[in-house]
Image (spheres, helix red, strand yellow):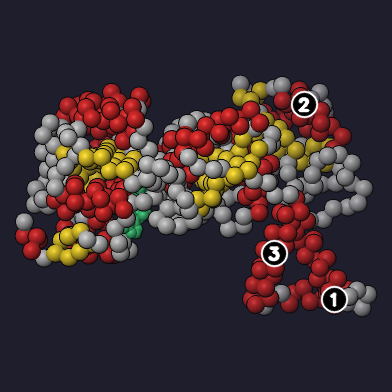
């Protein structure tokens, strides 16, 4: 190869100048342990079963030697990488493209939910590396729109997931389309024994590289659990105390994701949801928002558990406890990546304690019992944050319009008192004394009314009129209620007279609108 005489070193590994320039541009200075151990093996053509903790550079561990070996002058697909999710296919494609940039190697992500015609055109034009999810790849294989006869290297990223029941048939079908004489690479942070033995069927004399057999979770992640019966309240407390958090919150089901997203949005958090029932363009939009830091909270199913590398995720929160220890390892691994610190929080109900212990045992880690922040803690933090914002406003200097207010009060009140009262007003809002008979929090509702939060999930076909009518009928509040209900934006809130609020909630709990279960609860004060 013509580049082989111009070489340099990445740690102790010899690489061509072009690859070295690319990874230097990516900010890589030293290889990570999995890279040190596997790059030479992959370069030498061996089959490798690679296991290393989340966020320790497994992508480049296979990506660097693959991009080094490929022939950029041939337009045949020479390497095929399989990933379990579309988002991961995209991300791996991008990382490989960066590594191969100066060798002008073309990579193409191929997954469902994207127009197939565009993919077919790109494949026809010729690419050297395809990164795809099994379903769409099979589609191309069956249509004859992808030729895999020149594949030299096959990678199963998240190998244990790919060889798990859900994907195994598809994988076997794809294997039939690639040459038997090939290099096979399997990577994951978790490699259960039964998967390992299964893997042997697809590999030839594989070398097993295991960087962290003992400790499969990342030591830089502080792991806590909170035991509570009101997880939504607990989550809000956590999120409210962490003012600069960028969190991924995992739920067990798609419906759970929708409901939690709506609840968080209704409480004013910048949150959005990700799961497999959304359209691809919705998924792309949410991912982009989160990556660009336009979202504080990504609420997701396990579709986001594996492989995703999003900068500066500070917290991973298991709103629902993961189904198995592997899922726990991968979920929390979305934080604490590439040497950064992270926090993982798992909410459990008392009956889930055993499940938590099982996770602790099989991951050989300790998950420390945490104390949920009290309302006083939250206020403390908010006061601190307020101080910062106040200084900012003073530095900006654009508040002379309020001088008169202070000047009016100044003869009768102390300046320190005026300022402190103004801050209290800002943080806690305005509440008249004696207006607090119910347990409903002050949410800024009109006097004598309370605000109820309506969780309509994804039942977006419901019109405001349907809600009003059902409220009126079912709570037996015909007549006077209808005029009293105010529908707010996205019809997330209604305001009802304080004295009927309890009845409305009870009646709506038994009820559905157009077949959808509608959850109604008192809105939380913010
Ligand atoms: N040698 C290196 N030096 C600095 N950063 C690196 C190095 N290798 C990889 N990285 C960066 O570390 C981050 C994590 O890498 P990667 O996504 O490959 O981890 P992973 O081991 O595949 O994790 P997971 O198990 O979650 O899939 C990425 O942002 C990647 O660019
Ligand atoms: Mg990975």
Query: Is residue 505 rendered to the left or right of residue 361?
Result: right
Query: Is residue 225 rendered to the left or right of residue 163?
Result: right
Label 3 sits on a secondary structure element that is: helix
Do we see residue 176 in this rendering? yes
Q: Earlier in the sequence, mark 3 or mark 1?
A: 3
Label 2 sits on a secondary structure element that is: helix
Q: Quadrant of residue 227?
A: top right
Q: Nearer the viewer, mark 3 or mark 2?
A: 3
Quarter of the N terminus within the rendering: bottom left
Which residue does the numbered mark 2 point to in the structure image? Answer: 506
- Check residue 293 in the rendering and tell me which mark sits there, or answer none: none
Which residue does the numbered mark 3 point to in the structure image? Answer: 384
Query: Is residue 319 rendered to the left or right of residue 199?
Result: right
Q: Residue at x 27, y 43 (%)?
A: 209
Q: Residue 106 appears at what percent x and percent y?
A: 19, 50
Q: Residue 192 appears at what percent x and percent y?
A: 36, 32
Query: Is residue 415 rendered to the left or right of residue 95?
Result: right
Query: Is disc 1 surrounded by few (<14), some (14 to 19) or many (20+) residues within 10 Å?
Result: some
Q: Residue 130 appears at what percent x and percent y?
A: 22, 42
Q: Residue at x 78, y 56 (%)?
A: 428
Query: Tag count in the figure?
Result: 3
Q: Residue 447 appears at what percent x and percent y?
A: 85, 46
Residue 203 position (above or below residue 25): above
Q: Residue at x 83, y 39 (%)?
A: 439
Label 1 sits on a secondary structure element that is: helix
Dots 2, 1 in contact, CB < 8 A: no
Which residue does the numbered mark 1 point to in the structure image? Answer: 415
Q: Is mark 1 within 8 Å of ligand 1?
A: no
Considering every residue shown, the one lying at the far front of the view is: 214
Q: Quadrant of residue 114?
A: top left
């Amino acid at each position: 190869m013509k580049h082989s005489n111009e070489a340099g070193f990445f740690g102790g590994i010899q690489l061509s100048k072009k690859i070295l320039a690319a990874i230097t541009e990516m900010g890589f200075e030293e290889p990570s342990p999995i890279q040190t151990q596997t790059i030479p093996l992959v370069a030498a053509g061996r089959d490798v079963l690679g296991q290393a903790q989340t966020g320790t550079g497994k992508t480049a561990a296979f990506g660097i030697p693959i991009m080094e070996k490929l022939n950029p002058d041939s337009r045949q697909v020479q390497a095929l990488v399989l990933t379990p999710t579309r988002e991961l296919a995209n991300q791996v494609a991008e990382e490989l493209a960066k590594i191969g940039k100066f060798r002008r190697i073309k990579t193409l992500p191929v997954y469902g939910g994207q127009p197939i015609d565009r993919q077919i055109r790109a494949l026809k034009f010729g690419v050297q590396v395809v990164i795809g999810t099994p379903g769409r790849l099979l589609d191309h294989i069956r249509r004859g729109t992808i030729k895999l006869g020149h594949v030299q290297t096959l990678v199963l990223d998240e190998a244990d997931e790919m060889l798990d029941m859900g994907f195994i048939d598809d994988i076997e079908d794809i294997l039939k389309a690639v040459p038997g004489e090939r290099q096979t690479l399997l990577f994951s942070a978790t490699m259960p024994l039964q998967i390992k033995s299964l893997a042997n069927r697809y590999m030839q004399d594989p070398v097993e590289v295991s960087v962290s057999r003992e400790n499969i979770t990342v030591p830089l992640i502080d792991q806590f659990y909170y035991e509570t019966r009101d997880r939504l309240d607990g989550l809000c407390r956590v999120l409210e105390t962490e003012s600069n958090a960028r969190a991924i919150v995992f739920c067990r089901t798609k419906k759970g994701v929708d409901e939690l997203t709506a609840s968080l949005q209704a409480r004013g958090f910048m949150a959005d949801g990700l799961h497999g029932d959304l359209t691809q363009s919705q998924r792309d939009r949410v991912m982009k928002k989160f990556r660009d830091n336009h979202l504080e909270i990504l609420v997701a199913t396990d579709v986001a558990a594996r492989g995703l590398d999003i900068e500066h995720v500070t917290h991973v929160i298991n709103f629902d406890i993961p189904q198995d220890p592997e899922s726990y390892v991968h979920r929390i691994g979305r934080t604490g990546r590439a040497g950064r610190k992270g926090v993982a929080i798992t909410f459990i109900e008392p009956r889930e304690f055993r499940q938590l212990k099982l996770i602790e045992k099989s991951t050989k880690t300790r998950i420390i019992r945490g104390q949920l922040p009290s309302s006083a803690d939250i206020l403390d933090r908010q006061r601190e944050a307020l101080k910062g914002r106040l200084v900012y406003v003073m530095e900006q200097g654009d508040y002379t319009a309020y001088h008169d207010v202070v000047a009016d009060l100044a003869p009768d009140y102390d300046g320190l008192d005026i300022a402190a009262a103004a801050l209290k007003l800002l943080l806690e809002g305005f509440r008249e004394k004696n207006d607090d008979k119910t347990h409903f929090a002050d949410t800024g509702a009109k006097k004598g009314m309370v605000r109820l939060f309506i969780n309509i999930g994804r039942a977006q076909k419901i019109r405001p009129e349907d809600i009003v009518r059902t409220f009126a009928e079912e709570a037996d509040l015909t007549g006077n209620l209808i005029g009293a209900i105010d529908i707010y934006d996205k019809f997330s809130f209604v305001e009802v007279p304080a004295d009927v609020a309890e009845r409305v909630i009870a009646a709506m709990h038994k009820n559905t609108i157009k077949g959808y279960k509608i959850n109604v609860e008192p809105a939380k004060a913010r």
